[in-house]
Amino acid sequence: MILAPRLKKIADSINGFYSIADIGSDHAYLPIYLIKAKKIKNAIATDVNAGPVKIAQKRIADKKLESFIEVRKGNGLEAIASNEADVIVIAGMGGILISEIIENRLEVAKAAKLMVLQPMRDSDRVRRSLYNNGFMILDEELVKDDGKIYEIIWAVHSKENNRIECDDNLILGKAVIAKKHPLLKELIDKRVRELEKIMDSINGIASENCAERATDCKRLLEYYEEVRRWL
Ligand SMILES: C[S@@+](CC[C@H](N)C(=O)[O-])C[C@H]1O[C@@H](n2cnc3c(N)ncnc32)[C@H](O)[C@@H]1O
């Protein structure tokens, strides 16, 4: 079974654990791969929507893996109890949704030995939520899949008091900056192009909203330029 690079990167990072809960599993690609590769002993694949739940059940039944992977329909971490899974994976959703899922069932997230989070956008919201709720970011990675760059965050709850130093530190992962990740320049270039488009679209519009938006964009552009110089 061949996983897409994004999910393969997540799968490769799951080593030495007994179980995972894949929240918003959709086709259950990840748990099926991990069970077949004998990387974990059992899994819970959850989804809030009936369609994906059905698809996951069918794929798991086709592969005769029902005794290893349980499919549950439910909203976020409401579908699992604390300590039911060593690793919690929440991948392929927006960062705002991922942070809401974590914050709605903090006790479940805190009990996990590892959380693997892969926001499709708004990764700063995920980092903020993690820091504000006492999680430690262990590592971050970038993966290119089908021409797009994806961010992956590994985190665990920590007893240490984490503090956000400044907002800019959340826009990009500190770990990917520190390791001068080979995909970071490409990610920054893409974000800069998006910001420049926004700046063009609001250029000349006299409104308080647009002025605020332009200030935010300029601040971000300056930050990206600063990181670029470091790379
Ligand atoms: C784009 S798919 C990602 C599938 C897989 N995790 C991946 O990364 O390839 C997002 C899935 O999350 C599910 N989902 C959205 N909100 C959810 C929530 N609050 N709780 C559980 N699942 C959710 C959707 O139904 C959908 O199947």
Image (tube, grey):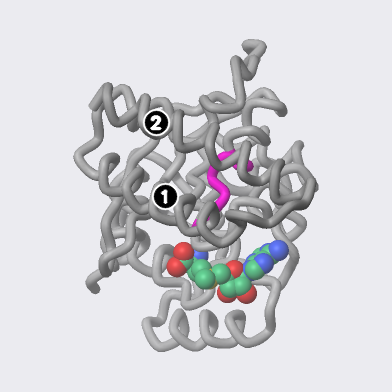
Whether residue 71 is visible here, answered yes or no, is no
Disc 1: which residue? 191
- Report if residue 123 lies within the magenta region: yes
Tell me the quarter of the picture where residue 49 sits.
Answer: bottom right
Query: Residue 223: x percent and y percent?
Result: 45, 29
- Please tell me which residue is depicted at 70% across the width and 50% down the height of the picture: 210
The relative height of residue 6 versus residue 73 in the rendered view (above or below) is above
Mark 2, ligand 1, within 8 Å: the answer is no
Report the magenta residues as a range: 120-126
Question: Does the closest atom of ligand 1 sit within 8 Å of the Cβ of label 1?
Answer: no
Q: Is residue 129 positioned above or below 18 on the image?
A: above
- On the image, the x and y values in percent for residue 191 come to 42, 50
Q: Which residue is mark 2?
A: 139
Q: Is residue 79 left or right of residue 140?
A: right
Query: Do callouts 2 and 1 mark residues in contact (Cβ within 8 Å)?
Result: no
- Label 1 neighbourhood size at 10 Å, few (<14), some (14-19), many (20+)? some
Q: Identify which residue, 203 or 40, lies in the foreground.
A: 203
Of the two numbered discs 2 and 1 on the same chain, state the one appearing first in sequence.
Answer: 2
Which amino acid does the dot numbered 2 rest on? Asp
Q: Which residue corresponds to the image point at 42% horizontal and 26% vertical from the top-left?
A: 174
Residue closer to the observer: 38 or 106: 106
Whether the magenta-drawn stretch holds residue 162 is answered as no
Question: Quarter-wise, where is residue 212 in the image?
Answer: top right
Looking at the image, residue 145 sits to the left or right of residue 135; the answer is left
